[in-house]
Every structure is written in structure tokens, then in C-alpha cells.
Amino acid sequence: MKTFCGRANPTTGSMEWLEEGEDYDYHQEIARSRYADMLHDKDRNVKYYQGIRAAVSRVKERGEKAIVLDIGTGTGLLSMMAASAGADFCYAIEVFKPMANAAVKIVEKNGFSDKIKVINKHSTEVTVGPDGDMQCRANILVTELFDTELIGEGALPTYEHAHKYLVQDGCEAVPHRATVYVQLVESRRMWSWKKLFPVHVEAEDGEKILVPPSEMENCPGLPSVCDIQLNQMPSSDFSTLSDVVTMFSVDFSKPIQSASTCYRVQLEPVKSGKAQIVLSWWDIDMDPSGKINCTMAPYWVKTTSALQWRDHWMQCVYFLPREEPVLQGEKLYLTACRDQYSVWYNLQKAREGENEADEEEHKADVRVESPVCRCRAHLLWNRPRLGELNDESRTHQYIKALRKVLKTDSVCLCISDGSLLPVLAHYLGAKQVQCMQPSRIDLYHPHELWQAFFKANHLEDKIKIIEARPELLKPSHLEDEKISVLVGEPFFTTSLLPWHNLYFWYARTAVSTHLASNVTVLPQSASLHMMIVEFQDLWRIRSPCGTCEGFDVQTMDDMIKDSLNFRESKEAEPHPLWEYPCKSLSDPREVLTFDFTKIVPQQCLSTGGSVKLLRKGKSHGAVLWMEYHLAADISVSTGLVQLSNEKGNCEWNPHCKQAVYFFSSVIESEILSDPNAVTYAIKFDTKTGEIAMDFKL
């Protein structure tokens, strides 16, 4: 059966209907899954195995049969560990049908079919009894239901149900407990992901300061956690204001309440500063004694042993509702509130003379509702985008370019989503400024946000928002004037891959009849760049596993490979490479250019060639990014910012995702000998706006 899927093409802006097979969603899910990453997580797997062996031993020592319930079994790995550790029987539950089918095959291939029953249901639908899915309740509960925030995948309601209906009282649990840790920090970089800082512009008539509206200043932001690879955040980008403290812990061997609740700890700052951010991570004890421990602690906390790289569990950044100045040694209360799926934080100062007896009363003050964005800015601008808008050196490049092209009689149209360029153009002396925000973001009502923005800066009648898509622009929108300066960053909320922002070129083409004959387009052009790299760790998410702790999981590898071949393998995928270190094996190369002074051509743009590999290393893939040439000698890059030539270490634009094309095979390249090159063919289809690429090693 075929399905028609509607999608807005991010590059051309047109609505398309694509015919997809019935397996489309399932292949997408598998291809983008992190199963391989989990199977490569040696530390996790070894600790789970140790914990399972210990739990089976404890049950056997009591003279009981070891009956295991494994919720969210995935490949069946944890059930196979239990069976090989001597468990009498395992019930392995997996709700995702393709995954449950794979688990059946993997269990059979490893010879455990008589010991493991795979149940393709949600655990809350599993029945117990002579005619049920499970013959009896289990006395060992094994799960891996955790995300970076610990509870985001519904671990708490799942455990709550399992204790009520599926496991015996006093059961063993692996993991036995989880503990959540927090640390209070000040960080301009991370705070820039929540707030819009004032923008200073030197204009003809003195300095102008663009300020955000008060609604945004007082907005708590989005409730969703910001999960990142905190190990890639240099210590120079934040200042710790408190020691690491335990926020709360959960004992998985006892009945669990998933209902919303709050936890509170007392903190004393170790230095004075501005409390803005709560950094958080967790660890799990696989056994009651806590000897078998798996931790997500970042590098400045866990200094003793090597850090295990993983992408399925990272660290959390939480934004306090407002910045709080704190003094070294003063008494503070940090409150964590949670519902079934998420956590949020609040900081309060202790009242004068407050003692322990006042604590309960104080606790009642704390609002338990999850933060909700009321200003709409956090819906329009995601966190990396706010970081980009707050990047002073980037803004300065646009100001420098606008100064070169604007005149006192300029009629300026800006086409970009949620851009500050219209305000900059007005401050820098354009006669008339209009802006279009074409992405389909009606849901967020960005125009109301902009009205508040203009009002806060007394610009209500200075900048006009055109509520039309570029192809529907009429002379009346422009008061019958021709556009003399067309500007864009370009940035569009619908873009996932770097070249999706070429939508600006299609929009420029759509408005071409409204442009003056001597129009200036900024940026005047764009170029696509490419470099061959070796990743420190990111390659693991696409690498086959083969065997995991002695169990054959090749069936899973084949399944991921089939799904990648179904659609994804000839496509690049977006990754924020500041979080994923790599070294360059080739020089960066400009491969395609796009001339915005002309309309989009009818014929495709294509290129090909060979790239020499300059360094020894494994060629894991190619990284691609865009550069925008704003005006003569003024460019901005969405990718490589700096390359250290000796070692090939790369510094990437921290606000953008770069495109990563993983090679199907991995080669060892020798230094500078002829065969050690990568040939490539890249084609930009101007009709679909898609880039097809092929690489041969």
C-alpha cells in the first residue's frame, strides 16, 4: 500500500506530495535510531551485565527461581545477559513491532529461544496469569528506559505500573537506583540561548541600542530540556557558582509514584556571580551497594577515569526563570519540580533568620507549573538561533556589509525568518524598510512578537511587515516603489540542512519583477564547501556492531543498513559539530557557487573532482556547509570557522548544524601518496532544490 505524504520543500518553498511505501515511517525510525550508539556503549553494557549477574545470584541464593522482566528490550541484549547469567526465564517486552521481530531473530540466533519470550506490547498492556503473557510475576526487573533527562521517555509511569501489576514485592531491580546531580553556574554563552541581548549599532546620528520587549525579558522560556555534550563545553565558557549537589534519587526496586512533585536542596555559593544555569546529569547504581556505577558526570567532575562517549545519554542545561545575583556563602534553596516526563528548576534566597522549621512553608511558595513561553520569541527562535542572534562578531559583519550598500534613498526588503536585519537597515539609514518571514509559522503568530519588538524600540511606523509569501508580493505591498536593496541572512525556520537556506534564492527569483534594475542583493552569492574528516566518536552512530558483550547482534546491523539504504544512505544528515570533535584529512574545498544577483537557473548545477587526503586517519565522511558572501570581502560561514593545520583540528560555527555524509566504508589513508584521494560528484537540482552527492574512496 502506498501513502501520499505532503511536505513543504525547505529549499524551494513549494508544497510537494510524495508517494511513500507503507514501511516509510518504520525505515525513518530505524535509520535515525540510536540503537548502534547504545550497542557501542561499552561502559553501559559491561555495567548492566555485572548488575544482572549480581541480581540473578542474589535471587538464587534465596533459593528462588530467577524470573526476569525486561521492559523495552530492543535487541533483547539485557534478556540474553540474564539468561546467560542463569535466569530461569525472561519476559522481554518491546512495543515497536519491527524491533520486537528483530529481537526474536537475535534471541533465536544466540540460542536462547527456550529461555526468553519476546512480547510485542506496551508494558501497561501485558497480562499475568495462566492464560496471560507472563505465567507469573517477575522477581527481577531489568529496564533501560532512560534519556538524558532520566525520565523523558516515561520511565516513572512504566515503573509505577510494573510494580503494581508485573513484579513481586521486594523484587531485585537493575538498575537499582538513579541519582540526579546539579551544579549552579554562570555562563554568558549558555544564557545567550535563552535571552536576546541588546544590540548596539553605530548610526550616523549616534549609537542606537536595540532592546528586546519586556514580555521576552520576563518570559521563563521553553519547558523542554536543552541536552548537549557538555564535555565539549570549554571551562572558559562557564563559571561554577556551587559545588555539585545531589538533587534527588529514585529507588527502582520499590514502588514508584510518578505523580508531579518537588525536591529542594540548600546551596551555598562557592563564589559570587550571576546564577543563570543549572547543569544536571545522573548516574545509575546497578546494585544496592552502589559498587557497580554508570555515570554521566562531565569532565570537570569525573577526573579519575576515561570518559565513555555516548550520544544517547548526555547532560542537561536548564535555564533559571530569571538571572539571580548571588553572594559567596549566602543561603539559597534550589527547587526541582517534575511531572512524569520533565524537570524544571527554581532558585530562591533564604529569608532572614529562616530555620529548618520554616522549610515546609517556604516549599509551598514554589510554583509547580512547568515553564511556558508567553512571549512567543522562544517558539520563533530556538536556542541555537538565539545564540546566533547574540553573536556580536556575526552581527558586526552584517552591519559592515549593510553600511556598504545602503543609501539614504534605499528601499529595502528583507526576506528571512525572525531576523534583526530590518531594524539594522532602518538604523543605518534606509529610506523604507519592509520585511517578509515566509516560513509557514502561522502557529506562532510571529507578527505579534514583531509588533511588540518594534514598540519596545519605538519603530512602530518605521518597518512594515508584509504578510504574504514572496510569490504573492504585489506592488501595493511596496507602495509602488521598486526594491533597491534586497537582504537576507539568509535564515529560515524550516531549514534542516545548510543548503535549505538557499530558499532565499528562490524567494529572490519570485520577487524579481519588483526589483529595481540596479538592485543590490545581500548576500550577493553563496558557496557550498566540503572537507573529508575523521570523527573522534560520531562515526559510532552509523557503525555496525557485530557482537556486543559476546552476543551476536548482526540482525540489528542489517536492519539499520536496510533502512539507511531505503532512503537515507545517499543523503547527508545534520549534526552540530562543535559537540562532535573531528580532524580534517583534506583541505576545505569550495564545490558549488550560487549567484543571488541572478534568478535561479533552469539547468542543474553540478561539479565533481578528486580531493587529496593530507593526513593519516580513517575517512569517516565528508562535512558540508555554506558560506554567504555579503559584500566585497565580507563573508559569514555556517561551518568551518578555524582549522589548525598541524593536527587538522577543526573549530565549527556553534550556532548551526553542518551536513555530515557518512562514507559506507572506512579506509586508512597514507600520507600524500596518489591513491589516497576521495572522488566526489555533487549535483544541485534547481527544480527540487535538492543536492545529490556521491563519494568514492
Image: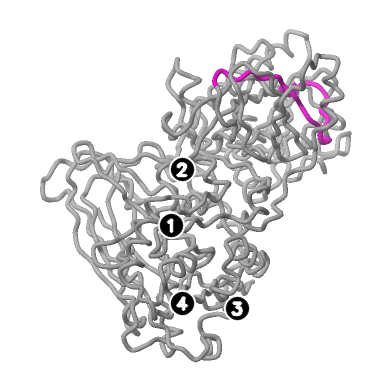
State the mark number for residue 541: 2
- Which residue has dot 3 on it? 467
Q: CA distance from mark 3 to mark 4?
A: 13 Å
Task: Kindly identify which residue carries mark 4.
Answer: 413
Q: Find the distance from the CA under tag 3 to the CA under tag 2.
A: 42 Å
Residue 472 x %, y %: 55, 86
Q: Earlier in the sequence, mark 3 or mark 4?
A: 4
Query: Which residue matches tag 1?
Result: 207
- Residue 357 placed where, x, y %? 86, 15
Residue 175 screen position, x and y as percent: 67, 23
Which numbered disc, 3 or 2, marks the residue closer to the eye? 3
Identified by mark 4, the residue type is Leu
Cα–Cα span, label 2 and label 1: 49 Å
Q: Is residue 70 left or right of residue 519?
A: right
Q: What stretch of residues is rendered in magenta?
A: 248-271
* Displayed quadrant of residue 580: top left
